[in-house]
Amino acid sequence: MRLADHVHLAVTGADGVLLDARDGVYYCLPEAGGHFVGDDIVDPDLAQTLEAAGLAIAAGSPRATRRAAPAARDLTQLEPPKPSRGEQLALARVWTASAGRYHGRSFAALIAQARRRAPSENLASDEDASTARRALVFARLLPWIPFQGVCLYRSFMLLAYLRAAGLDAAWVFGVRTWPFEAHCWLQHGDLVLDDTVDGVRGYLPILVV
């Protein structure tokens, strides 16, 4: 028995945390971290319980999962550039187009939208520097964006803003326990784009889009 394709696992200490990406629900399983080997559930009772809840399926082919590099850098040491008129207009267009794709949409719909990546041939030539600048511009303009909301909204909008310029980033969802918290942010390689290294260090990635 293994976890269903829409269910993702993080083992932190002795505990297991599941994310049902279909419903956007997290489940914390104290002292259950040792009951998993990758996506396989090695405890029969837990496997039966998760199968009954629609979170596990009969063992099959291993699924491919995207991973993020450990966060090592952020943008706090860089001075935010003065946004050009074109960058301001680009963000306005992205917000107009993307707000309707966010509000009222399910977690699964947001993830599906994020998985529609731009073709690689559209990527900017100086991708690392271009991505950093774009994220810095976004941070500078963020106070003027309506309905800024929580990290989910901010990361969704920044990802759309990057992709409008032919850039991309990994959308990382992380968890921690005692107390339980979930968080998300964007990374380009090991560079954190909309948080700090210290701000994300305590979270264990559970899903990378």
Image (cartoon, grey):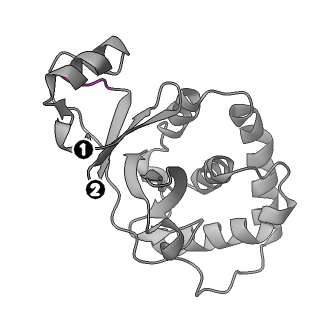
Instruction: Tell me which amino acid carries mark 1.
Output: Gly
Near mark 2 (Cα within 10 A), the count class, few <14, some 14-19 or many ≥20, is: few
Say which mark, if any, is on residue 13: 2
137 to 105, vertically: above or below: below
Screen quadrant of the N terminus: top left
Screen quadrant of the C terminus: top left
* Residue 67 percent coordinates (x, y): 31, 52
Q: Which residues are magenta?
A: 1-5
96 to 164, vertically: above or below: above
| Nearest the eye: 55 or 185 | 55
For the stretch drawn in magenta, what is the main secondary structure? loop
Circle 1 residue: 33
Q: Are marks 1 and 2 in contact (CB under 8 Å)?
A: yes
* Residue 48 percent coordinates (x, y): 23, 16
| Nearest the eye: 84 or 137 | 137
Cα distance in 3D space between marks 1 and 2: 7 Å
Instruction: Tell me which amino acid carries mark 2.
Output: Gly
Compare marks 1 and 2 and give the one earlier in the sequence. 2
Q: Residue at x 71, y 68 (%)?
A: 139
Q: Is residue 192 left or right of residue 45?
A: right
Say which mark, if any, is on residue 109: none
Q: Quadrant of residue 102?
A: top right
* Secondary structure of residue under mark 2: loop
Near mark 1 (Cα within 10 A), the count class, few <14, some 14-19 or many ≥20, is: some
